[in-house]
Image (cartoon, rainbow, N blue to C red):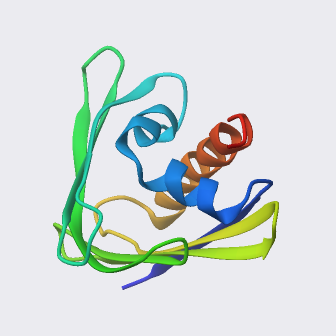
Amino acid sequence: MEKIILNTTILKPVHEVWEYYTQPEHIKKWNITNENWVCPRAENDLRTGGRFNYRMETKDGSYGFDYAGTFDEVIPQQKLSYTLDDGRKAEVIFNKVDETTTEVFLDIEAETKNPVEMQKNGLDKILHSFELYSENQNSK
């Protein structure tokens, strides 16, 4: 299975980046590819063996899907690995660069229904949305 590997650098401390990436109230605000999409629901049982489900849909309701799976490993402020309900594996690494900068790496197996380049572009847009959202939050 082909892998998609993406990364971004966020000018926020790792503890804040972790919170923005994992807490449902934040996920619902950044988990979109563009302004025509929404994420009306995000559920996250953030523990090894816990389930997650993020609902993504177009604003007009014409299309939507659940991005859901089970966490295989949760190391706070360092790593999330999970298996999606379709069997694909993914990993997100949070690398503390310094006190104000965090690198986020996403490594996910591509699905077979859509072209890999299309999936990569969509995931890159979501990661960019996450970066913008994170950097626009007031520091704690």
Q: Position of residue 9 (x, y in %)?
A: 76, 62
Q: Position of residue 114 (x, y in %)?
A: 36, 58
Q: Is residue 38 above or below residue 47?
A: above
Residue furthest to the top: 60
Q: Is residue 28 above or below residue 13?
A: above
- The quadrant in which the C terminus is found is top right
Q: Residue at x 36, y 85 (%)?
A: 1
- Is 50 displayed left or right of 134 in the figure? left
Quarter assignment of residue 115: bottom left
Q: Is residue 83 left or right of residue 140?
A: left
Query: Seen from this angle, which residue lies furthest front?
Result: 140
> Residue drawn at (39%, 72%), measured in percent from left and top?
110
**56 or 70: nearer the viewer:** 70
Name above or below for residue 94 compared with residue 65: below
Q: Position of residue 90 (x, y in %)?
A: 39, 76
- Numbered marks: total: 0
Q: Nearer the viewer, residue 126 or 50?
A: 50
Q: Residue at the location (28% across, 61% down)?
A: 113
**Is 139 on the left-hand or right-hand side of 46?**
right
The residue at 81%/66% (across/down) is 99
Q: Estimate the x, y position of residue 85 in percent, counting from the top left.
A: 16, 66
Residue 122 visible, this orientation:
no
Is residue 138 in sight in this rendering?
yes
